[in-house]
């Protein structure tokens, strides 16, 4: 026995799609900058691993001119360094 769901009409919305702020181009650019910085400066990558909180990481990145929210940092912490491991304990 199979259940079949039929879409009996199209639902068109007047609302245009807007990406979530955590998936924006600005977040993507910040992530790329962080990855580049970590690759070019191994001491910085080590410093990331030694930090305790996301806020501490965000403030350190701010000193390099990289602006990103704590939420975006937390979501992407496993993709900031090439080995794919989370960067800080926080």
Image: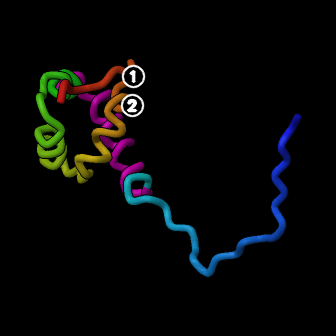
Q: Is residue 7 above or below residue 48?
A: below
Q: Is residue 61 above or below residue 90?
A: below
- Which quadrant holds residue 13? bottom right
Q: Is residue 25 above or below residue 16?
A: above
Residue at screen point 26% across, 51% down = 68
**Residue named by callout 1:** 84
Q: Main secondary structure of the magenta part?
A: helix
Q: Which mark is residue 4?
A: none
Q: Position of residue 14 (x, y in %)?
A: 61, 81
Please give the count of numbered marks on the rendered protein: 2
Q: What element does badge 1 sit on?
A: loop
Given residues 68 and 41, the one toward you in this image is 68
Magenta stretch? 24-43
Residue at screen point 21% across, 26% down = 88
Q: Which mark is residue 79?
A: 2
* Residue at the bottom extreme of this rendering: 14
Dot 1 and dot 2 residues touching (CB under 8 Å): yes
């Amino acid at each position: 026995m199979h259940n079949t769901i039929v879409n009996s009409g199209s639902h068109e919305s007047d609302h245009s799609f807007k990406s979530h702020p955590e998936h924006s181009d600005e977040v993507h650019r910040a992530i790329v900058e962080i990855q580049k910085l970590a690759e070019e400066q191994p001491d910085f990558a080590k410093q990331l691993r030694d930090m305790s909180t996301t806020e501490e990481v965000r403030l350190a990145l701010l000193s390099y001119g990289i602006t990103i929210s704590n939420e975006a940092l937390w979501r992407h912490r496993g993709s900031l360094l090439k080995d794919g491991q989370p960067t800080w304990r926080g």
